[in-house]
Image (spheres, rainbow, N blue to C red):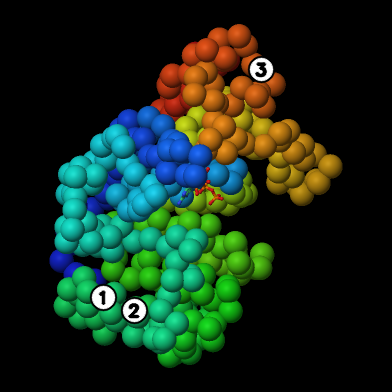
Amino acid sequence: MSTAEQTLTPTTSPGAGLKIRNLTVTYQTDRGRFAALKDVSLDIRPRAITGFIGESGSGKTTLAMAAMNAIRAPGLITAGRIESEGVGDILKLKGENLRRIHGQHFGFVFQASSNSLNPLKRIGAQLLDLARSHGAKNPTALLHEAKQLAERMGMDGDRVLTSYQHELSGGMRQRVGIIFALLLRAKIVILDEPTTALDMLSQQAVLEIIRDIHKERGLTTIIITHDMGVVAEMADRVVVLYAGRVVEEGATADVLQRPMHPYTRGLIHAIPRITGDLSDAQPLAGSPPDLATIPEKGCVFRERCPVRMSICDTAEPQYQTAHQDGLVACHGVNAND
Ligand SMILES: Nc1ncnc2c1ncn2[C@@H]1O[C@H](COP(=O)(O)OP(=O)(O)OP(=O)(O)O)[C@@H](O)[C@H]1O
């Protein structure tokens, strides 16, 4: 075991997953309070890479933040339970216990985080602050490991650690965000659009490193993305979100080869096939509702659905088992077919 590995006492057993049950999150807006996630139940498997996919506004970031009990006003978790090994119900944690798991149980980088680096402190000093604030016994060893991670991601480690945020390009800041997420050797790592600021080559390289570190450390990794290509390449399992509902979930190979929900089929057909034949792509018609216009009853996807039936106007589809060990919520699906 390296020195860096000994610096934090593990707070969890190896391989932590998440059991999310009946999770509802609302946001207060100037038009009222609306649900951005409604009654979501889902298992995130330990040691798997899970991709959250869906159009902008579908609730991917809200789900990931809620999973860590990190929703802030004007958002509110109004119902649910989220269990994780060694932590219990995350939604019951408060104060210091919650702060401690944000870093030690969950490592994370959200889209806004690259902007939330402290502009007045060098990156190395901020990494040290994070390590110390979590009681790391050997923060210097963690800093050394951060430098090695920077180098694995194609950067000059010394330069990154001695730089201020404004001295780094967008792509470098994005990679620095990933280093922050990995610093404390958390069991569950959440990466929100980790490679959007990167060119294709760097994107490939960074995804490969994320995959390598995921395996080396036995992580549970969640990747939030708009990009079905990233899901296909990285994820063992995929969670498809639409208007605050999980509409389909399963092993990536199953879902991509045999999508059951019409929204999943639409997302897959909207991207050029792996062959890169742009003429194959069929954009998904219409656009998703905003919070205030999500239908209160019936299926939230029906306005855009090519297989809409009359029951879709009145009853919200319930989860049914699909793909052996996944789920789908659609009236038009007979999962036993
Ligand atoms: N602070 C907030 N106040 C009000 N509404 C919010 C807030 N944050 C998110 N929302 C709304 O909640 C819904 C889900 O947003 P969320 O950011 O979770 O979606 P997303 O799938 O992650 O989108 P993106 O891919 O654009 O990041 C959207 O309708 C969004 O407008």
x 26%, y 85%: residue: 140
x 49%, y 14%: residue: 315
Q: Is mark 2 within 8 Å of ligand 1?
A: no
Residue labelled with disc 1: 131
Asked if the residue under mark 2 is in contact with the one under mark 1, i.e. CB atoms within 8 Å, the reply is yes
Residue labelled with disc 3: 307
Q: For this view, does 175 lie left or right of residue 69?
A: right
Rendering coords of residue 141 (x, y %): 27, 82
Instruction: State the image quarter where residue 265 is shown.
Output: top right
Q: Is residue 144 above or below residue 103?
A: below
Gap between marks 1 and 3 measured at Cα: 52 Å
Q: Identity of the amino acid at label 3?
A: Val
Residue labelled with disc 2: 127
Q: Which mark is residue 107?
A: none
298 or 261, which lies in front? 298
Gap between marks 1 and 2 measured at Cα: 6 Å
Q: Quadrant of the C terminus?
A: top right
x 53%, y 57%: residue: 193
Q: Quadrant of the N terminus?
A: bottom left
